[in-house]
Amino acid sequence: MGMNPQIMLDEVGSLPVVLDPVTAGRLLGMSRTTTYRHLKAGTFPAPAYRVGRSWHIPTAGVLLHLGLDPNTLLECGCGARRNEHQEADLGR
């Protein structure tokens, strides 16, 4: 079984708002099996929600667990726009 390539910090801004379990686990350095074991046991280190037969894991929760503030990322990749107050805070 091959190892998944690491996700680099500059790629974090292009992540979707909600992650699939494999991607979320990859960000946390977990294998697919370990990720699903934690999800099933309710011990996954970030918020995770069961929707039908699928798991949805908010990217923000994973980033916070890693000590990264999702609010400081300039390009979140989610299509959300900053408001004029946030733009002023950034000196734009």
Image: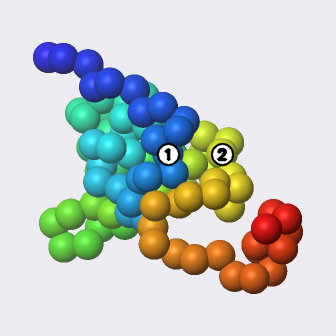
Amino acid at the residue labelled 1:
Val
Q: Quadrant of residue 5?
A: top left
Q: Is residue 59 left or right of residue 3?
A: right
Give above or below for 62 relative to 47: above
**Nearest to viewer (mark 2 / mark 1):** 1
Residue lying at 18% horizontally and 17% vertically, measured from the top left:
2
Residue 58 to residue 81: above or below: above
User: Dot 2 surroundings within 10 Å: few (below 14), some, or many (20 or more)?
Assistant: some
Q: Is residue 60 visible?
A: no
Q: What element does badge 1 sit on? A: helix
Residue type at numbered disc 2: Leu
SS at mark 2 in the image:
loop
User: Extreme front residue here?
Assistant: 92
Query: Between disc 2 and disc 1, whose residue precedes?
Result: 1
Q: Nearer the viewer, residue 2 or 35?
A: 2
Label 2 vs label 1: CA separation?
A: 10 Å
Residue designated by label 1: 12
| Labelled disc at residue 68 | 2
Q: Nearer the viewer, residue 92 or 30?
A: 92
